[in-house]
C-alpha cells in the first residue's frame, strides 16, 4: 500500500473564498460589489439607507460583515443647528485597524496609516454646515481583524461643549 498526500489547488480555494465573501457583502449592502463608484461614498448626498448599521467601536469580524480583508466605508450623518455648525470641531475616531482616510462633507480632514494610533482630526472652519453633515471613513484592513476598535467614549464628534457619539452605516468595496 502506498500512502498519498492529497493535492490541494490553493488558487481554486482562494477564488471560492473571494466569491463567498463577495456574495455575503452584496447581500449586506444591497448592491453588487463594484457596481457603484466607491468615491461617491464620501459624498453627502449618497444614499446609504440600504447599508447595515455597524456597531462602533467593534471589529467587523464580530458583526454581520464577518471576516474580510479589504476596504470598508463607514458613514455617519449628523444634523447640526446653525450655532453648532460654527463651533470648533474635533473628530475622535479612537483606533482603526489598519488605515483610514476620513472625510467630512466630502472634504478630507485626516488620515492615519498606523493600526494602533488614536485618530483625532480637527475639522477646519467652514466644512460643517447647518442641517445634514456626513462623516465618511474609508477603512483599509490589510489582514487579520479590521475596523474601528478601542474605547467607545473616544469615538465622537466634539462641537464646543456638545458631543455626538459615532455609530456608522457600513459598506465594503
Image (tube, rainbow, N blue to C red):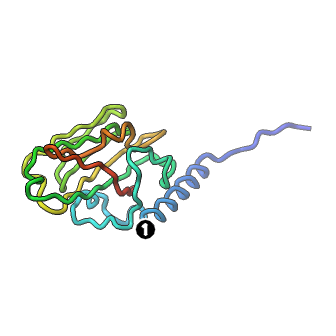
Location of the C terminus by quadrant is: bottom left
Residues 83 and 31: in front is: 83
Q: Which image quarter: residue 99?
A: top left
Q: What residue is at 21 percent from the left and 61 percent from the top?
A: 44
Residues 69 and 145: in front is: 145
Q: Residue 34, percent across and down?
A: 39, 62
Q: Would residue 84 appear left or right of 55 to someone viewing this image?
A: left
Q: What residue is at 20 percent from the left and 60 percent from the top?
A: 79
Q: Would residue 114 appear left or right of 14 to someone viewing this image?
A: left
Mark 1 crowd level (few <14, some 14–19, many ≥20, 10 Å Cα): some
Furthest toward the right, the residue is 1
Q: Would residue 133 appear left or right of 143 to someone viewing this image?
A: left
Location of the N terminus by quadrant is: top right
Residue position marked by numbered label 1 in the rendering: 30
Q: Residue 105, percent across and down?
A: 18, 56
Q: Which image quarter: residue 2?
A: top right
Q: What residue is at 48 percent from the left and 54 percent from the top?
A: 65
Vertical order, 55 against 155 (above or below): below
Q: Would residue 111 appear left or right of 19 to someone viewing this image?
A: left
> Dot 1: what SS?
loop
Q: Residue 8, percent across and down?
A: 68, 45
Vertical order, 171 against 153 (above or below): below
For the image, the number of numbered tags is: 1
Q: Residue 28, percent across and down?
A: 46, 62
Q: What residue is at 75 percent from the left and 43 percent from the top?
A: 6
Amino acid at each position: 500500500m502506498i500512502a498519498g498526500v492529497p493535492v490541494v489547488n490553493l488558487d481554486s480555494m482562494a477564488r471560492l473564498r473571494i466569491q463567498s465573501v463577495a456574495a455575503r457583502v452584496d447581500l449586506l449592502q444591497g448592491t453588487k460589489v463594484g457596481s457603484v463608484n466607491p468615491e461617491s461614498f464620501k459624498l453627502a448626498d449618497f444614499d446609504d439607507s440600504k447599508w447595515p448599521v455597524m456597531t462602533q467601536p467593534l471589529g467587523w469580524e464580530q458583526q454581520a460583515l464577518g471576516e474580510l480583508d479589504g476596504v470598508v466605508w463607514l458613514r455617519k450623518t449628523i444634523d447640526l443647528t446653525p450655532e453648532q455648525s460654527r463651533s470648533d470641531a474635533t473628530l475622535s475616531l479612537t483606533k482603526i485597524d489598519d488605515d483610514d482616510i476620513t472625510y467630512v462633507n466630502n472634504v478630507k480632514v485626516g488620515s492615519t496609516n498606523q493600526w494602533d494610533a488614536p485618530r483625532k482630526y480637527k475639522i477646519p472652519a467652514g466644512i460643517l454646515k447647518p442641517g445634514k453633515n456626513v462623516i465618511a471613513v474609508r477603512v483599509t484592513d490589510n489582514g487579520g481583524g479590521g475596523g474601528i476598535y478601542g474605547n467607545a467614549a473616544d469615538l465622537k464628534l466634539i462641537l464646543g461643549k456638545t458631543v455626538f457619539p459615532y455609530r456608522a452605516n457600513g459598506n465594503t468595496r
